[in-house]
Amino acid sequence: MIFGDQIAIGPILPIDIPRLFQWFDDVDEVRLNEPYRPLNWHRQESFWLNADNDHSRCFFAIRSREGPEIIGFVQISRIDPIHRSAMIGIQIDKAHRGRGHGREALGLAIDYCWNHLNLTRLTLNAFAGNERAIALYGKAGFQQEGRFRDALFIGGEWIDVIAMALHHPERVVSRRRESALHAVS
């Protein structure tokens, strides 16, 4: 477990599967991230509990320091050790939003990516209408790199997708310094 002030992030446990299943079977919640499709319990269980078999992804349950129940999750996927990059995403249960849990969990996850996975670049895609998520990612230092117009059709409407990225500040500086040195020599 990795502890913050209000929350901790740690492994997804079998006891968390019913709550995760419920979140991904909620049409209104899912539409913030993807089109809704009916779920298969066994596939969901395998997806969440077998991440150890796939080194390109890592999941963290978000738990309040006040109790053991899952209140959200962090998903790190497309982990590429050669290019030192990955995609990241976060979800907080409706009842726990607006308390700083998402900000703290994202900060802990970013720190994990920099210091445990040795990554240099994190990317994510956010739906243009998900202003709360875009604001959170912006406060964490993510910058918009592009916009995919009318990229997805969800709930009867076309959705723009915002591509955002965060670079490890120290590693970007050293990379730019190296580029400048090579240009001079």
Image: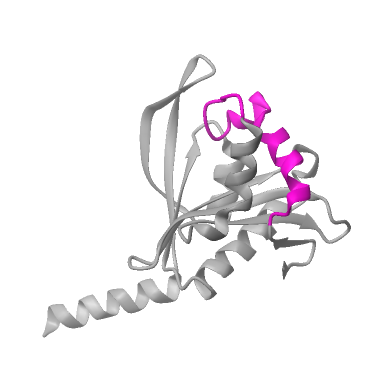
Quadrant in which the C terminus is drawn: bottom left
The residue at the far front in this view is 42
**x, y percent for residue 137:** 55, 51
Residue 99 to residue 170: above or below? above
Which residue is at 57% across, 35% downward? 130
Q: What stretch is highlighted in magenta?
A: 12-39
**x, y percent for residue 33:** 55, 35
The residue at the far bottom in this view is 185
Let me know if residue 114 is in the magenta part.
Answer: no
Q: In this view, does 10 lie to the left or right of 162?
A: right
The residue at the far right in this view is 66
Indicate the colouring scheme: one colour
Which residue is at 63% across, 51% downward? 49
Which residue is at 54% across, 18% downward? 155
**x, y percent for residue 39:** 61, 29
Quadrant in which the N terminus is drawn: bottom right
**x, y percent for residue 161:** 43, 35
Residue 52 occupies which quadrant of the picture?
Answer: bottom right
Which residue is at 71% across, 48% downward? 72
Q: In this view, does 98 lie to the left or right of 182?
A: right
Q: Does residue 130 appear in this view?
A: yes
Q: Is residue 185 left or right of residue 160?
A: left
Let me know if residue 26 is in the magenta part.
Answer: yes
Residue 170 occupies which quadrant of the picture?
Answer: bottom left
Residue 172 to residue 51: above or below? below
Question: Closer to the camera, 83 or 162?
Answer: 83
The residue at the far left in this view is 185
Q: In this view, does 42 lie to the left or right of 69?
A: left
Q: Does residue 141 appear in this view?
A: no
How many numbered marks does the figure carry? 0
